[in-house]
Image (cartoon, grey):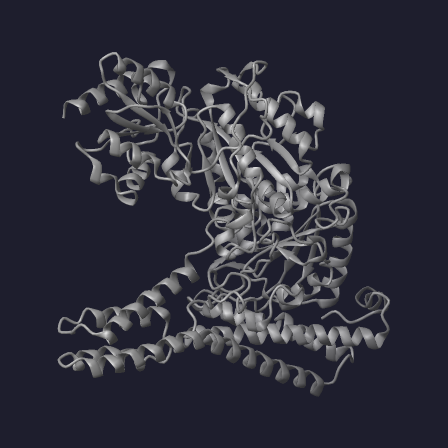
Amino acid sequence: MTTLNHSETETLGDSLSFDEFKREVLEDYRLACLSRHTSLIGRKEVLTGKAKFGIFSDGKEIPQIALSKFFQPGDWRTGYYRDQTFSLAIGLATVEEYFSQLYGDPNEENDPNSAGRQMIAHYSSPNIDENAQFLNLSKMNNTAADVSPTSSHIPRAIGLAAASKLFRNDEDLKNLKHLSNNGNEVCFATIGDASTSEGHFWETVNAAGVLQVPIAFVVWDDGYGISVPRDLQTTKDSISRVLSGFEKNGEATGLDIYTAKGWDYAELCEVFEKGVARIRENHTPALFHIQDLTQPQGHSTSGSHERYKSKERLAWEEEWDCNAQMRSWILGNSLAEEEDLVAIEEETLKVVKQARDKAYKKYQNPIKEQVKHTVQLCNKLLKEQKTAKKEIKKVASNLINNKQPLRYNVLDTLSEIQTISTLQPGAALEELREYYKYCKKQGEDLYNSHLYASGANSALEVEEVKPVYSQDSPSLNGYEVLNRFFDKTLENNSKVFAFGEDVGQIGDVNQGFMDLQKKHGSHRVFDTGIRELTIIGQATGMALRGLRPIAEIQYLDYILFALEQLSDDAATMQYRTKGQQFCPIIVRTRGHRLEGIWHSGSPMGILMNSLRGMRMCVPRNMVKAAGMYNTLLKANDPGLVIECLNGYRLKEKLPDNIAEQTVPLGVPEVIHSGEDITIVSYGSILRLAMKAVKRLEKEGISCELIDVQTLLPFDRPHRIVESLKKTSRILFLDEDVPGGATAFMYRHVMEEQGGYRYLDTKPQCLTSTAHRPAYGSDGDYFSKPNAVDIYERIVEMMKE
C-alpha cells in the first residue's frame, strides 16, 4: 500500500494545513463507509422482497470519491449505473433518495431523479423550467439522465463536451453566462470496463480524439463483465493498452491516457488532479483506466459471483478491497486511530439504516392509506350487503394480510370485489367503484405522464403562423427554399448549429446548406465523420446544455445506426425524469422515393414504435419542412423531420415569411376536397396520389386527399374522421411495409376516432411490398405503390 509522502500531502491537501488535510481524508472515508453500507443494506432490501432489483457500486467507492474532488459546478456527468458514490459526493443524490429509488417511489419529492421510473443509481438534474427557460447550468452540478443499456450513455458525451468548445470559441455565445463559464466545463463519462467492448464506446472515443473536446473517460475495471472475464472481452486484456494507438504523444489529435490502481487513494487523487486540469485547460480528451477494482457483492442481486470467480480471486478481492486498503493507509500514516475509524463505521451504518427506514415509510404511507380506505369501504359494503359478506371478507383479507402492499394490490382488490356476482346495488358499492376509478387515475398520473413536454415547452402550444405570399414571391427549387430558411435561422438564432456527413463544405448532398458554412462559419455548419450514432449523441449533449442542434442523418435508411440513441435516450428523457430534463434535438433526414434498397427507405413503423416521446414530422414539400423546423425550434420537444428525397428539384413558391411561418403539429391538411372516398397519406407519395385523383375525377369519382403532416402526433382534431363521415370510404396509403405506418393510421382512425361507425365498405390499406425496393425505375414501380395502383384500388373500392 502506498505510504504518504510530502508531495502527495501537497497534492491531496491542495495547500491545506495537515489538520485540514486529515479532516478531509476522514470525511472521504466517512463517505466511503456510508456508500458501502448503502450497497450492503440495499442488497438485503431486495433479497427480503422490499425492493425489486439491485445493482450497487461497492468496491468502487475510493476512486469515485477521488474523482469527485475535481468535478466543478457547471461540469456534466454522463454515467454508469455504478456511480453511486460519485453521485453522493457531488450532491446529485442523498442516501434517502437512493433508497426511495430502490423501492420505486413514484413521488418526485422522494425520488427527484426519476420519480420511481428507473432503478437505483440512475440520476438526473433539471435543465429547463416550466417557462421553457434554461436554468443556470453554469452554477449547477449537472448530469444527463442515466440510461441502463451498456455504454448507451457514452455517445452524448461528445455533445456535452463539444458544447464547452463552442462556448469558449464562439463570440456569439459569450453572453450566455447561465449556460457556461467560458467553456471551462468538463464532461465526466464513466463506464464499466466490460462495456468498453460496445461499438458506442469506440465510435465516441474516435470522435472525441478527432474533435479535441473536454471529456474525461473514466473506466472502472473490476476484471469482469457479469461472469465473463476481461481477457474474453478486451484485446490485450487492457482497454488502456489497446487504446494506446489513440494516445496523443505530441500529436495534434488523440487523447491522453492515465492508469491508476483503484485502491490507492493517494495515487488516484494525484492522477485525477493532473488529468482533469489538463482537460479543462486545453480541451484535450483523456482516458482514465482505473484498475484492480473489486465487486464484493457480485454483479447484481440476480446472482452470485461465487459461481464464476475462483476462491483465489475472491480472497484477492477481499484483501484489495478499496475501502479496506484506505483504512489500512489511514492507520499506517497515523491519520486516525482504530477507534476513530470504528466510530465512523458505526455512525455511518446508523445513518444509512435511518435513511432506509425513512425512505420506506415515505414510500409505504400513501399505499397504506389506500389499503386503510379500501378496508373502510369494505366494512361499509358488508353492512349494506346481505348475501355477499363471505366473498367480500375473503377478498379483503388478502389485502389486509399483505405486509408489503403495492398499489396494484389495492386495485386488484377493488376490482375483484366489484365482480362478485351476488352484490346488490347501493351507496357503499357506488362509493367503492368511485374509489377504484380514483386509485386507477392516480396510478396512471404517477406512471404514465410526461412522455412529451407540456405547457410552454410543448411544440403543440406553438401558435400557427401561415405562410405569406406576394407578387414578388419567387418560385425556387425545394433545396433553395430550405437554403433560404436555414440561412435566416442561423442568422437569427446564435444557438442553432447544423452538422452531419457532408453538411459543411458542400452544404449537404442535396444542397440545403449550400454556401452556409462560408457565410456563418465552420463552427456553425460543419462536417462530421460517418458516425450516425455519435452524430445523435453529439446533438443530444449539445441540446442538454442549451444549444439547438440540427443533426443530419444523410438518408433515412441509415437512421437505424442511430436508433438506439434516439429510442433509449432522447425519446425517453422527459418520461424517465418526469419532465425535469429536456433534450430538444432536431434530427434532419430524407427518405421515401428514390431508387435502390438503401436510399429509398420508409421504415416508418419501426420509427413510430421506437420513438414515442419525439415529434415525427413528414412534410410533403420543403415549405412545409421549414414550417415544422420553426415549430420545433420554438419549443423543447425532440423532433425528427423526414424530407422528401425526390422533392429537392421541384419548384415551390418561397413564402415572404419563410423564417417565421410555422406548421401546427398533429393537424392534417385536406389538399384536395372530395365526396366519394378519403385517401390518407403523407410525404412523397401524395404527388402520385394526386395524379390518380385527377384521373379518377375524369371518371366521376371524387376523392378527398388528406396529408397527415405529422405521425407523432397524429390528427389531434380528428379531421380524418370528419372526412370519413362525408365519404364513408377510406384508403390508407404509404410507402412502408404492410402493417407499418398504415396500421398505425388505421388504428387511430378506426379505433381511437371511432371511424368504423361511418363505413359503407371495408377500410383498406395500400402499401409497399414486404421486401426492400429493388433498384432502378422498374424496381421502384413494382416495389412501391404507384399512381396506377392507387387508381385501380379506388376503382375496386367504389364497386363494393
Assign the C terminus to one quadrant of the image.
Answer: top left
**Number of dots carrying numbers:** 0
- Residues 358 and 217: in front is 358
Measuring from the top left, give residue 231's x and y in whole percent: 53, 53
Measuring from the top left, give residue 316's x and y in whole percent: 58, 70
Q: From the viewer's perspective, is 712 left or right of 29? A: left
Residue in view at x 27 percent, y 44 percent: 751
Assign the N terminus to one quadrant of the image.
Answer: bottom right
Q: Quadrant of residue 27?
A: bottom right
Using the rendered image of the protein, determine whether residue 234 is visible from the camera's viewpoint. no
Above-or-below relation of 176 to 410: above
Q: Residue furthest top?
A: 698
- Residues 397 and 590: in front is 397
Above-or-below relation of 440 to 462: below
Measuring from the top left, give residue 179's x and y in whole percent: 70, 49
Q: Quadrant of residue 418?
A: bottom left
Residue in view at x 24 percent, y 29 percent: 727
Using the rendered image of the protein, determine whether residue 556 is visible from the camera's viewpoint. yes
Q: From the viewer's perspective, is 139 left or right of 635? A: right
Above-or-below relation of 86 to 247: below
Residue in view at x 67 percent, y 42 percent: 162
Q: From the viewer's perspective, is 93 left or right of 519? A: left
Q: From the viewer's perspective, is 309 left or right of 66? A: left
Q: Residue furthest bottom?
A: 339
Measuring from the top left, give residue 750's x and y in whole percent: 26, 40
Residue in view at x 52 percent, y 17 percent: 653
